[in-house]
Image: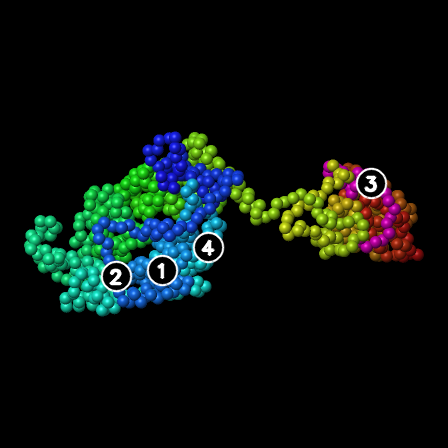
Amino acid sequence: MDRTQGQVDPAEPSSGPARVVTLTAGDFTLTVNPVDGSEIEPLRPGAERARPRRRDAAGRAARDTAARPPVLPGAPASARLTPAREEERARLVRLLSHGRSVRLTGPSGSGRSGLLDAVAADCAGVAPDGVVRLSGYGQQQPGELLHALYAAVYEAPDERPLRPDREELLTRVREIGAVVLLDDLEMGGAALDELLRATPECAYLLAATPDTKAPSDASHLEEVFLGGLGRAEAVEFLEAGVGRALTEEETAWAGDLQFASEGLPLRFVQAAALLRQRDELNGTRGGDEDEEPGVFEERPRDAAFVPLPTLAEGAAPAELLASRVSESARAVLRIACALGGELPHHAHLPALVGDTHADAAVAELLGCGLLTPVGTRYRLASGVARQLEEVGYGDPAAEEARTAARHYAWWTGHASVTPERVAAEADAVLAALAGADVVAAVLLARTAAPAFAASLHWEAWERVLRSGAEAARKAGEVAEQAYFHHELGVLALCEGRLERARAELEASIGLKGALADKRGTVAGRRALALVTDREAAGAAAVSPPLRLAPPVGGAVALAAPGPVAALGPAVPVAATGPTVPVALAAPVGPRASEAVTAVVPARRDAPANLAEVFAEPFPMSLKPSPAPALAPPVAARPVAGSRKRTVLLAAAGALTVAALGTVVALAVGSGDEETTPAGPGPKVSSTTPDVPAAGTDTAGEPGGNDSAGDPADPAGSGSGSGAVMEAEPGATTPGEGADAPTPGVSRGAGAKPSGGGTPSRKPPVVPPKTSPVASPPTTSTSPSSSPSASVTPTATPTPTTSVSAPTATGTGTGT
């Protein structure tokens, strides 16, 4: 049994290899199940991963044979290099022997693959790990090439296949010392630099076309350009292909072809095939002139003379060559055009074409120069597919692709087919999958995906899964779509792409839940749990864990009740108010290696509700306090407790606003208006009447008599005699009579002032409303002839009212 197959119980009769394969992928054990989907689990505790071993000489020879195209039926074609290619061959061998990496650049059809074969034979014993042949066709990233190099040098143990993770892969390939021949390179720049850095002990011979992205300057690659053949070399090469000497006419035609094709060897391989076909059609080939034509050959009895091809036919000979090959070969060309230029293995051609001898058509087409080797397979040569499609070979492409897809769906699902054989046919399978209808595509992807997974060809595995998921979505196959999403999630998990794995697995779980697939849902949730564990492990590795611990050096406080050592920048309290400095302490940060969450203990004396919070700054009952001494408008004093600091700062700002409003009101208004302070405290009335001018009353109007008959005027000065009035504490204001309000007593809403005087036209100035914490201003009247008012706001949060003994003295004008 092949080592990549699963283990079979000896007690059970085995009719064929088991298709359930168990392999090791990094830190996971992956069980590829074609029926229910892959299952993934971490390696069991104590289980050691199998260590790969290097291949010996016999293993390297077997691996090199498997890396080359298959041997075709019939005599092998002899490959001979021209003298110019021999010089380039010696130069390449010399550079590789000194450990230098070389980039061999040449157009398609310049003979790069043949030159690499010759160099491989000369460098067999140069490096300790021998010569490794790789194909870069379709490879844009170095990851899969590194895995191919690893598989070529290391051999997994017999227990199970092994696909290393990225860390182990880079460690292993760094130790490889080999001459790597990489044909059909399609990457350059940073990707190529990554490949070269990962394998510093390898010497590379990179064959690429001129349109391939150039390497960076840091790669230090030797550049060797592969040019075309000269005129003499072209004639010699053509004679070797035809097997005879050329006539003068043919020599002249060969010279013109060399000028038109710039000496590409592929054009002369095809030209030699045209001359051979011409000789066969003209009956001048191999001394068969005596035989009767048409009995065993597909040519007419009376064959007309076939002239030399034109120069245009020699430059684009695909149509003419295809018209002269066998019918089986033309059917093979139609299949290759339907598969985008990919040619299936010659063992599949009898089933695809319907001819038992169709496998011999590959050698026929290869001899005509219509096919070229690419890695382990053959495909149409450069420009051949375009030339054939122009003449109708691509018309039945849809039918041919559908036939190929159904054939590969049966073949990949057969129990006798090993995953290695499926992996060798990966390009043709993917080409058939791309051109088939949705039903055939779903069937092929469903059977080929487990084989690609078991063969460790994971790039083809991912491509076939994505194509299958899209085809299942278009076909409405919900169960198959859930399978493909589950496999994509498992693949992403194995490669460490956790976000992609979570998205694919969640989509699969949702689809399986809609189908009531309990077993599939459980498998998806198990894989999703591994994704969660990996994410948690990654987060723990990136950032240190949080631990609860008190901060070193104490907590940071906004303000301290004691003396402040250092004052921070001033913090503005209000838009128009002063600024209050805030004490800042130096913050104590965690150490660089860990993150610490500070735990601040709860206060034992902290208030339980909002009523207790505002009880101290806003008492329910007002208590009189002695008049404070004059102080600056705002004094910064320590506040007991940092929790009340914000409230007290707001109260100080409110007091400042109230004081400024009161000062403005007293400055604008005159002494004859009533001043009613806001707040719950007692009201204070203190008025110093202005001295009216001659001929005017107290209201400022001529002939007014507002104060006449006022009982509070003992001297009868309401007639405007200018007598001076002394206001006692219980006296009424002018113009209000007996019903004037007394300090501490509020007049009712319906009370009307007594007296028939006309009210003053100047409205009283009412000070702005303040917050409940604002204390009424203290009004003092100095014993001077000019009225003055001095207001000093209190800085304490408790509202207090202080009333000084108001006195008003003056001397009348008449005395």
Side (left or right) of 352 relative to 34: left
Q: Which residue is mark 2?
A: 80
The Cα atoms of the two marked residues, 3 and 4, are separated by 90 Å
Q: Which circle, 2 or 3, is nearer the viewer?
A: 2
The Cα atoms of the two marked residues, 1 and 4, are separated by 19 Å
Magenta: main secondary structure: loop
Of all residues, the one furthest to the right in this rendering is: 815
Kindly identify the amino acid type of the residue bearing the numbered disc 4: Glu
Residue 419, located in which quarter of the rendered image? Answer: top left
Q: Mark on residue 175?
A: 4
Query: Marks 3 and 2: in contact by CB < 8 Å?
Result: no
The Cα atoms of the two marked residues, 2 and 3, are separated by 117 Å
Q: Position of residue 305 (x, y in %)?
A: 9, 59
* Sooner in the amino-acid sequence: mark 2 or mark 3: 2
The Cα atoms of the two marked residues, 2 and 4, are separated by 36 Å
Q: Which residue is mark 1?
A: 123
Q: Is residue 541 visible?
A: yes
Kindly identify the amino acid type of the residue bearing the numbered disc 2: Arg
